[in-house]
Amino acid sequence: MSAELVAAAGGSRVIRAVLWSVALAALGYVGLSLWAGWREVTAAVVQVGPWVLLGLLGLSLVNYLLRFVRWGRYLSLLDAPVPWRINLTAYFAGFALTTSPGKLGETLRSVLLKPHGVPSAASLAAFFAERASDLMSILVLAAIGLWSYAPARPVVGFALGFVLVALLLAQWTSFIAAIDRWALVRAEQGRRWAKLLSQLCEIVLHFRRCFSLPAMGMGLSLGVVAWLAEGVGFWWLLSALGYPLDLQTAVFIYAFAMLIGGLSFLPGGLGSSEAVMIGLLVMNGLPEASAVTATLICRLATLWFAVALGAGFMARVR
């Protein structure tokens, strides 16, 4: 699973998937606005005002920068530190492909960092460590409202169990080494899949270094604060629309919508996150037009703001 392999085998397909997701998202958002009432949605957007919108973008930027700090720390733990300017450009350029399935397009960072001495195994391990840390952070925030929304408990419990099993398997070095030896024997027989499996074992062995107790504490702390910033932005947005919810409920709705979007493995969680967010807002007393408006603005200020920033950084390193 080298950077060259990722770039050559899937690069064009990833970009096509992103372009399709952008087009489908635009059509879906227009359809949602028409369904909820175009005039009502437009009036709600005007009610929010430019200062609140700028504040939401600022909180999203806080999220991205905190996650960048965590990314840099993971690379240092993997003995692959990079000058921060180069690393920042590569990290943000990855956001351009964040709407690819499973966010795998973000492994573009491996391609951009390899000329600067970062092994593919290290950058890919940092990528998977990020995904695991983000999932745990979202689970922590979603757990805040579990007692007030019972149907969410099985989903959160399943996700938590999945993370724990994955982390335990990643720490089982003898098991990983046995798979690696088995794969190497078959790789010598010319079987390509065995070579890929061996390289995957190398990535997992790198990955586990990011989940010692101190590293896990660092990653989880930064992740919780980063995603909480966007949750606070969502709470602020609801207040600006004239439907204030308590901070706990607003953060839960945001986090649970992000969790469902992540577990759906749809590009950027498109469709699934929006449906959950709108449904929970309506359950909490918001009219459909306001729920749709809050969801659309939230997604534009978080997901699509990241894609736009990533496109700008990608243009610099093309």
Image (cartoon, helix red, strand yellow):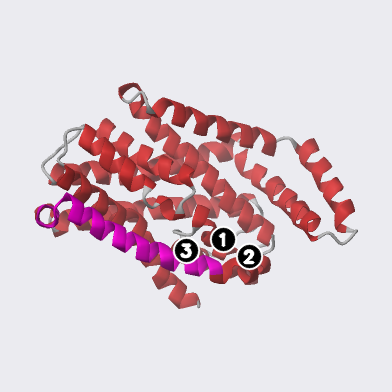
Label 1: which secondary element: helix
Q: Is residue 25 magenta?
A: yes
Q: Earlier in the sequence, mark 2 or mark 3?
A: 2
251 left or right of 189 in image: left
In whole angstroms, how far apart are the C-alphas of marks 2 and 1? 8 Å
In which quarter of the view is residue 231 placed?
A: top left
Residue 213, horizontal then vertical, whole percent: 59, 34
Residue annotated with mark 2 = 6
* Magenta stretch bounds: 13-42
255 left or right of 117 in image: left
Q: Nearer the viewer, residue 298 or 88?
A: 298
User: Where is 144 relative to 117, above or below?
Assistant: above
Q: Residue at x 26, y 42 (%)?
A: 278
Mark 1: few/some/many CA within 10 Å (<14, 14-19, 20+):
many
Q: Residue at x 71, y 46 (%)?
A: 205
Mark 3: few/some/many CA within 10 Å (<14, 14-19, 20+):
many
What type is the residue that disc 3 sits on? Leu
